[in-house]
Image (cartoon, rainbow, N blue to C red):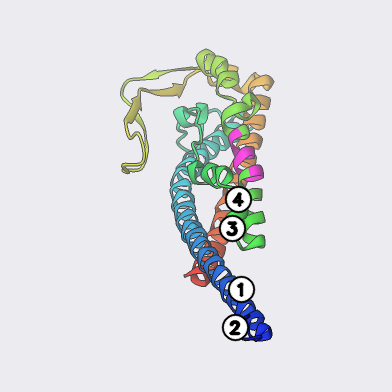
Amino acid sequence: MIKENTTSKYLLYAIGEIILVVIGILIALQVNNWKEERKARTLEIVLLENLKKDLTLDTLDINFNIKYHSTFINEEKKLLNFLTSDLDYPATVIDYNAALTTPLIIVLHESTFANLQNNDIGILTNNSLRNDISRFYDFFSTAIKKIENDLPAYETYNVKLPYFLKYCKLDPNAPEMILSNPDSKDYYNPEFKKKAIVLHKFDEAKQDDAFKIILNESIFFRQVTIDFYINMITRINELTNEIDKALVVLK
């Protein structure tokens, strides 16, 4: 083309080649970006599905604790009502083992959230959902573990025990108290049993104001725990619905 003095045609040809190369590179980059985006969305779907499974498992443990906290508080209230009454003997049957209570713990499934943090939680494309997930684990999950596992003030078993030792005795004829987890492979599922105890020093117990105060405080702390658990169940249901909506969009 140069020999034939067709330089302009040569330049146009060269520019055309460059444009084709650039277009090829852009297409390759676009395809690569599409593949990476697809991988990220696939990972996002897996993480959200696993998070939903974790939340479902958490409701099992939460409902287990609500069940027993509710049993405990009912018996504590019956005992306190008797101690503050003019009755010589309880008008209703009181489960003194439940009134003494058994310390409980909460174990939440947080492996998926930890995985999210390790993979950068920004992988979640729904900003509102991302914020709600972070808030649930940063506040609600952390708070209930503090209340149930770490703060002795919320578990008054050790404070109540001396009073029960003073005023109660074992009753070998009463049914044993049984405490067990739901029948699930996700739980250590023993069946705990212990001999029943009964109140036998009625007058002394009724005159002990410190015992009444301790029971009153225990009831208060237990109600706070139950209310927090119920609120968590509500939050989990809301979060699960948000996850379901996000999965519909992603899929």
Helix, strand or loop at mark 4: helix
**Is residue 13 visible from the viewing direction of this image?**
yes
Marks 4,1: beta carbons within 8 A: no
Q: What mark, if any, has residue 124 been given in the picture?
A: 3
Q: Which residues are magenta?
A: 138-145
Query: Which circle's residue, 2 or 1, is located before the other in the chain?
Result: 2
Q: Nearer the viewer, mark 2 or mark 4?
A: 2
Give the residue type that dot 4 points to: Ile
Q: Which residue carries the number 2 mark?
A: 1
Q: What mark, if any, has residue 121 been given in the picture?
A: 4
Query: Which circle's residue, 3 or 1, is located before the other in the chain?
Result: 1
Q: Which residue carries the number 1 mark?
A: 18
Marks 3,2: beta carbons within 8 A: no
Res 170 quadrant in image: top left
Residue 144: say if magenta.
Answer: yes
Marks 2,4: beta carbons within 8 A: no
State how far apart marks 3 and 2 are (Cα).
Answer: 56 Å
Q: Residue at x 36, y 41 (%)?
A: 186
Q: Is residue 208 above or below residue 220?
A: above
Q: Position of residue 163 (x, y in %)?
A: 57, 17
Q: Nearer the viewer, mark 3 or mark 1?
A: 1
State how far apart marks 2 and 4 are (Cα).
Answer: 58 Å
Q: Nearer the viewer, mark 3 or mark 2?
A: 2
